[in-house]
Amino acid sequence: MIITSLALLLVSLPITPILAGQIPQVNGAFGGVRNPPSAKFRVDQVDATVSPAATTPGKLRIVENSGVCETTPGVYQASGYGDLTSSQSIWFWFFAARKNPDTAPLAIWLNGGPGSSSMIGLLQENGPCRINNDSSTVSLNPNSWNNVANMLYIDQPVGVGFSHGTMSVGTSQQAAQDVWKFLQIFFADSRFSKYQQREFAIWTESYGGHYGPTFAAYFLTQNAAIDAGTVSGVKINLKVLGVGDGLTDPLSQYPGYITYAASNPYHPLVSTSTLTSANNSFYRSGGCQSQIQSCYSTGSTSTCSRAQSFCNNNVLSPLAGNFDVYYVLAQNPDPYPPDITSFLSSSSLKAKIGAESTWHETSETVYDNFASTGDWMTNSRPHLETVINAGVRTIIYDGDADYILNFNGVEAMVDALQTQFTSVYKQQTFTNWTVAGQLTGIYKNAGTFSYLRIFGAGHEVPAYTHGSLGIGQAALEMFVQTMNIQPISST
């Protein structure tokens, strides 16, 4: 069994009732659905301290160099809103690269949910600062991804995190359209127009297995439409897609819950009887597998929503046992990564960064809107194949201590890909990956595609360490190699 130094850290952390995580529990089930399948789409208004008259549709409203989070001397930062309309405002936090910001690429980071804030990634994972155990202060992160890239963290869709306004998004495709619109506003601003021609990357995790491929494919379509003269706007120079611990192709991935719960690098998660019950729920006539297949074949919102409810109540959730679904070395409740609500709820902090609404880790309304459309159980693998075939450098990665989007399922999805590199990929065997000479994972490369399984990491891969490496050191190495448009290799 692989033991991480983080496991020892958990012992000394204070136990809190807060369960850090990106996927909501509904009626006791991770990824559950309220009142399936009759949940109604809700168009709610999120309260904010700013009145609609104070918004600037089609423009940014920002605070520059707040001094919060990024304290490296001379490194520019900006936070604020891109107003899609007078009643829809997208929150972002931008950090220039610590090294060579005038030539470094631009990367966006998106957390999942659906409905979860990208401040999770910023403060718990790969941002310039990381939340401390007291949940109220932060420390500078030496392994921040803005070491080498200009980083743009976006709370999306509207209603998520600090974003506020009318919530009208319930599918990944609709979310892609809003993020494209936000980026057009961002690139049109004189303070950020210099990034229009930079190499552009999408990095995401969890529900980002839907977001990343869908957004990337949509951006490529929009670029082609601009070239054809049917759409006006700024082309996005998409070069990289990175998806960590992602939900992409549920039909391929859901058997992985059974496999991982029974046998993983650490310990079984549940009893034999629970495994048997979940296995029956998946494979029986009318069970999870057949419901996902029906979702795929019909595209019916009620069928897909019903599949989400059944599979997550009868397969995903029961197989977790009493272990943290995001890091199986810990039992519930798991206090790591520390909760960020207190930090982001400070009125003085919000004033410094220009935040206008109350921050929540996940928007129930946005989550419920996605659940009502059945987007969860749709298949984003065709979008991923499109992006890979377009020559975009793509990496799929996974932490081997994550249950909720475990490597068994993710690797099954990767094995199912049909791309120009499929035959080469199938010929590959896993190669050991070392970082600073330490065995840290295994990988496969094929053309411009890579898959990487990282040892000792949970769902939020950059929040973890392995051996004597620093927290996030392995994730940063993966990021650097990929952003350099290179395959994964050992150091």
Image (tube, rainbow, N blue to C red):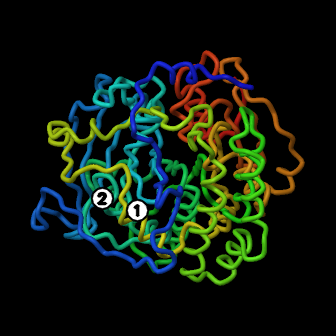
Where is residue 67 drawn, in percent x and y? 23, 30
The residue that appears at 76% across and 60% down in the rendered structure is: 417
How many angstroms separate mark 1 from mark 2 (CA)? 9 Å
Q: Secondary structure at mark 1?
A: helix
Placement of the C terminus among the 4 image quadrants: top right
Instruction: Kindly indicate whether the residue at mark 2 contacts the one at mark 1 (C-beta within 8 angstroms).
Output: yes
- Residue assigned mark 2: 90
As rendered, which of 54 and 455 lies closer to the eye? 455
Placement of the N terminus among the 4 image quadrants: top right
**Can see residue 390?**
no
Quadrant hosting residue 99: top left
At label 2, the amino acid type is Ile
Q: Earlier in the sequence, mark 1 or mark 2?
A: 2
The residue that appears at 65% across and 84% down in the rendered structure is: 298
Quadrant hosting residue 20: top left
At label 1, the amino acid type is Val
- Residue assigned mark 1: 179
State left or right for residue 483 relative to residue 152: right
Where is residue 134 drawn, in percent x and y? 33, 26
The residue that appears at 67% across and 34% down in the rendered structure is: 454
Characterize the local packing of mark 1: few (<14), some (14-19) or many (20 or more) Cα atoms within 10 angstroms. Answer: many
As rendered, which of 191 and 82 lies closer to the eye? 82
As rendered, which of 227 and 301 lies closer to the eye? 301
